[in-house]
Amino acid sequence: MSTSPPSHPELRIVPTDAPPDIPARLVDDFTPRLIDVGEHHLCPGCGEPVAMRTILEAVEEVDAVQRAVAVFGVGCYTAFSNNLDVEVLQALHGRAPSVATGLNRVRPEVLIFTIQGDGDLANEGLQEAIHAAARGERITLFMLNNGVFGETGGHMTTTTVLGQRTKTSVGGRDAELHGRPLQVAELLAGIDGSAFVARGAVNNAGNVARTKRMVLRAFETQLSGAGFSFVEILTMCPTGWFVETEEAPDYIDDQLSPVHPLGILKEA
Amino acid sequence: MNAPAPTHRLLEGCEAIAEAMVVAGCRFFAGYPMTPFTEVLEHMSRKLPEVGGVCMNAESEIEAVGMAWGAAAGGVRAATGSTGQGLSLMQESLAELTMARLPLVVLNMARAQGDYFQATRGGGHGDYRHIVVAPADVPEAVQLMQLAFHLAEVWRNPVLFFGDYYLAHTTQSVDVAPVDFGPEPARDWALDGSSGGSGHARLLSPLGDHKQRDDVGYDLSTYFTRVAAAVGTMAATVEPLVEVEACDDAEVVVAAFGSPARYVKAAARDLRAEGHRVGFVRPITLFPFPSAVVAAAAEGARAVAVYENNQGQMIDDVRLAVLGRAPVQFIGGLSLDGSGFGIAPDLDVDVMRARIEDVLA
Amino acid sequence: MSAGAGAGDKVLVRGTVVIDTELCKGCDLCIDACPPRVLVMTEGGVVNGRGYAYPQLLPGCTGCRACSQICPDFVFQVYKYATPIELEVGP
């Protein structure tokens, strides 16, 4: 029986404090190889670590561990810049695409990807992303989209949906006052130079698996020289959305993905 | 008359500067057209691919400095630049990549001399310093450009090359031979992906230089203190460069920098030839400022006069150096052509003479 | 769990997990993510050292990795048995 205090006396709890003592195969470790330490101070229920796991697993799966550089923007996810076993180049808010471009031009054999949020990429750095796509720059941009500036406490970005309450749209985003949300994946898909553009989410296991396939396709696009790739990943932010952690996955399905639909928008 | 040595060629300043960059090993350049920087970008666009380098016509100044940041991070000698306004746009990045301790050469092909504060006080936020070199003519520009890359490499710190419109478009005979500065530190901090998976994958960041690998994250206090110490060492160790002439017995010492200094020097020499005890001092590194030499030059003088094509910026550093040994007087001022690019009525030996004579009187 | 299951019923178990309870921040995402619904959060004030309720495992795990893939805090290690076993559900 379980060695932890029984909190469900009516149910049989299976011990989970040690690996199995009958023959078994480890199919998923606590952290992927390329995340050094699992513990972090991001909020309970945050989708960004889930997206980071997906991306770092993909780096391993395309066999690029010793030829990858992650170029970080600035947001909650920047916590991971300090804790990855791939090389990391820290850029400024919005500026990862130009920094990634410079590195790409002098180290074209390296798998170069950015980790940015919606505030970082779509607000501060929109022109950098557009220009990288137009150039067909052989890099991959990842935009972790939670519809808020999370790190500063939950403020409206250009992807915030109508009706979404944030600290700078307290009554809910209003089209008259605040304008309408920008669909970044659609914008970049419409640019000639982009070769692979997709939008995934990490709010349930199925979406995580589909997003992983998008990430792999994006990396393959870069490594094959086909051109610019972009994957937008809708991530949960219960803190920024003023919802319970267990409601955040539904918030993505009900509020965000109707405006920012999931799927592959463009492929070579 | 002797013919010039075969290695000398008649080159316009902007081209000589570009060639000096290539000779110094620069293999990445990014810029955005803006007068009077544009022609440097044009020359680099042509010259860099010839040596296997990359020149990007960036879509904006901020993207230009970003690209240079990324290239430098990859361990390649990189440079960017603009004129003062473009550098204003780049300031956040310039301040932060200094905190990431990246070598980079940054050109300001300035309009007149109003960017002295931007260059030496740092137009960006926070506590950082750039070495600043200010050539007065094309041959000196070629030497200082190569020195700039060397210092940037040795100190892992940006170096600002302070040129101007006049320098860019003056044609002079120059020898763009490579200068050997001796050994430079290995770029063991540069990124190429190869340390991935080792447990010690490299980090290049304005926030820290090694992965904490814990749940706490960056320790900015420790890191900023360490960077400040490195910058302090740099400021104390880099030899300030300065030109001094006839100051030992000078009654009036005139100070100037950059292209206008050539006219000031010519005027000082004319006056000296007529028996006036006029001395001349020209800071070449604006940071570290040659304070000790300026102070020594002012010793025994009745007055120090500062010419600069602005409303008075370098004069602050001169006053600090002179520290009361003699009164410091401003004989400069705004002198512009109609387009504001700095080809000015003041660039005239007679004008400079008159200004100095006023002080002598 | 199936409403009809009672003491003595057996279920096929294809895998199991190791749960690092101290890392958990009580977000509940794993509960809904688990396809056979064999994760339950502790109740009745039972919490880890940081004050969060954490997941416990019921019989029926398939080793599908949904929990480990959805967990933001890297709480789960997932194993697949070489040969599925049978476990009794219920106390």
Image (cartoon, coloured by chain):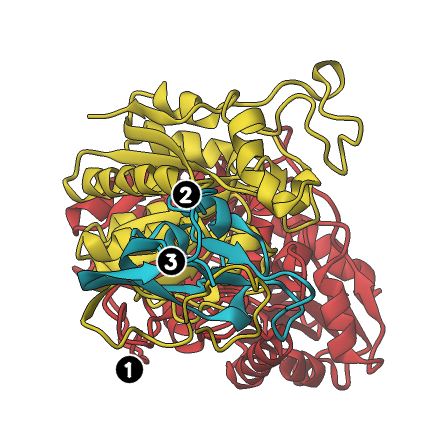
Chain colours: A yellow, B red, C cyan
Gap in Å between the C-alphas at discs 2 and 1? 35 Å
Q: Nearer the viewer, residue B243 or C26?
A: C26
Q: Crowding at label 1, few (<14), some or many (≥20) Cα neighbours within 10 Å?
A: few
Q: Name the residue under label 1.
A: B182
Q: Residue C8 carries which label?
A: 3
Q: Is residue A139 above or below residue B131?
A: above
Q: In which quarter of the image is residue A192?
A: top left
Q: In this view, does B114 lie above or below B257?
A: above
Percent from the top left, x then y, of residue A122? 53, 33
Read off the chain for label 3. C
Q: Crowding at label 2, few (<14), some or many (≥20) Cα neighbours within 10 Å?
A: many
Percent from the top left, x then y, of residue A142? 40, 42
Tag 2 and tag 3, C-beta contact below 8 Å? no
Q: Mark 2 points at which residue?
A: A97
Would you say B273 lies left or right of A261 here?
right
Q: Crowding at label 3, few (<14), some or many (≥20) Cα neighbours within 10 Å?
A: few
Q: Which of A234 and A130 is in front in this view?
A: A234
Element at label 1: loop
